[in-house]
Amino acid sequence: MLQDKIAQYSDEIHAFSAGTADELEQFRIRFLGTKGIIKDLFEEFKTVSAEEKRVLGKVLNEFKKLAEEKYNQLKDSLSNTGSSRQTHGDLTLPGNGLELGARHPLVMVRTEIIEIFKKLGFNVAEGPEIEDDWHNFSALNFPEEHPARDMQDTFFISLSKGEGDQGSESVALRTHTSSVQVRMMEQGKPPFRAIMPGRVYRNEAISARAHCFFHQVEGLYVDENVSFADLKQTLFYFVQELFGEDTKVRFRPSYFPFTEPSAEMDISCTICKGAGCQMCKHSGWVEILGCGMVDPNVLENCGIDSKKYTGFAFGMGIERITNLKYEIRDLRMFSENDIRFLKQFKTELI
């Protein structure tokens, strides 16, 4: 009889357990498949009398519900334990490994520079990449006729009508992170001791040695009785930490509108060790940064008494430092996202 079959199959379902996904799939086919037991029982149900249908209909529906609940319960159990994956494929084969990435070389060098100056008590300051004329040029003692204001060097931003009285050349993509120094000195009071890492922009032709954007780290220290000797010792410590104790340093007189006196700092070439190579142009020396004592006019422009306070500033390109550390000859490689290039830094894991 139909009712006896249902009782027999119900006992079978209660006793069933699946250890693998294949066993569970056989259960589904046997009971819930298109040619399974439940399908056959419903076909047989059509042949019973009307009186029996009133009783067996409820029993048969409960049996179907029992089979479905059992299947879903076992399916969830296998999914949680991971057993459903154990029977697929050759278990002796190695798993699919996750390929680890690495930090970008510029990020690694930027982080290393920051950590060195943090040891000397320098904080990290940041500012906007779109700057006005005052913070990017005028406050830093750039005369109106200075070549850096020329369209060949700077990406100026034209303002549409109704956005104020500023001219079309009063806003630009910052050409250096010195603008962050100006904002910091305007908004606070000495002493200041901070570095300013960030991206800057110059309207230059892209080549192996130049790019229209690059990255800088600038530094500023303003306090009473700050001297050029303090500047030299700070930068000497930085070079020794970054490139090693055998690295030599020399300072050459130079000119920058915002520092006086000004200098450029060279280090002995880390690639040829001073013997001469293409990187150092066979001189044995490589220029890595510009520096100097903050011009009194810059301090006064920022509301700082130049008779009471003095300070020094410096700035370096992160790309130049990275070139020396990893012997990378083409600046364009830093921004091309070439996996072949980036994979070389996998020893520096995140």
Image (cartoon, rainbow, N blue to C red):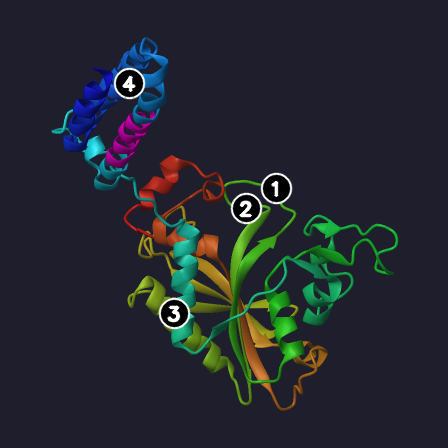
Residue at 38% x, 75% y: name it. Answer: 119
Point out the frontmost of discs 4 and 1.
4
Residue 208: x %, y % from top left:
50, 41
Q: Mark 1 touching mark 2, by CB under 8 A?
A: yes
On screen, residue 263 above or below 201 = below
Q: Residue furthest left?
A: 92
Point out the frontmost of discs 3 and 1.
3
Q: CA distance from mark 4 to mark 1?
A: 77 Å
Q: Which mark is residue 80?
A: none
Q: Mark 4 touching mark 1, by CB under 8 A?
A: no
- Looking at the image, tell me whether mark 3 or mark 4 is earlier in sequence order: 4
Q: CA distance from mark 3 to mark 1?
A: 33 Å
Residue at 71% x, 55% y: name it. Answer: 172
Point out the frontmost of discs 2 and 3.
3
Name the residue nearer the viewer: 114 or 293: 114
- The type of residue carrying mark 1 is Ala
- The type of residue carrying mark 4 is Ile
Residue underneath mark 4: 38
Name the residue nearer the viewer: 317 or 285: 317
Q: CA distance from mark 3 to mark 4?
A: 75 Å
Name the residue nearer the viewer: 47 or 230: 47
Residue underneath mark 3: 116
User: Magenta residues, as a range?
Assistant: 61-74
Q: Mark 4 touching mark 2, by CB under 8 A?
A: no
On screen, residue 122 above or below 169 = below
Residue underneath mark 1: 205
